[in-house]
Image (cartoon, grey):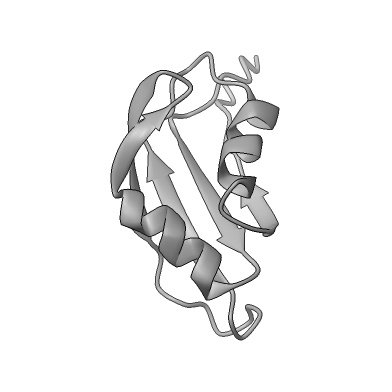
Amino acid sequence: QYTLKPRGFVYVTFYSSGSAEAALRKGSCKVMGTDVEISEVKRMSNTVTNAKRLYIRGIPCDSNEEELMKYFESFGKVVTHIFPRDKN
């Protein structure tokens, strides 16, 4: 049975490192009324040269993916995001 509830974290890859740096400067902040922590993921060899991937933890279980992405897109263009959900 799939509950499809968010697992409490998300990966966001920004097109430019400047956008990722702006989000990282927040460190921890309120997103959708909840304190979240933003940290950097080490560069993967197959990513866009200037892209930067961030790990955001503390996402509430009732979070809305579209709202969350709207928040991070305020820092710059988001290339991809991974929003894991529970499978059971």
Compared to residue 61, the image places residue 53 above or below, namely below
Compared to residue 7, the image places residue 50 above or below, namely below
| The one of 71 and 43 positioned closer to us in this rendering | 71
Q: Position of residue 44 (x, y in %)?
A: 52, 78
Classify residue 33 by image quadrant: top left
- Report whether 48 appears left or right of 75: right
Classify residue 15 by image quadrant: bottom right
| The one of 52 and 30 positioned closer to us in this rendering | 30
| The one of 28 and 5 positioned closer to us in this rendering | 28
Q: Position of residue 37 (x, y in %)?
A: 31, 42
Please report the residue visible at 54 percent of the width from the left and 63 percent of the height from the top.
Answer: 19
Q: Position of residue 75 (x, y in %)?
A: 56, 53
Q: Position of residue 28 (x, y in %)?
A: 29, 41
Figure disc tally:
0
Please report the residue visible at 47 percent of the width from the left and 77 percent of the height from the top.
Answer: 43
Please report the residue visible at 52 percent of the width from the left and 50 percent of the height from the top.
Answer: 11
Q: Quadrant of the N terminus?
A: top right
Q: Quadrant of the C terminus?
A: top right
Classify residue 64 by image quadrant: top right
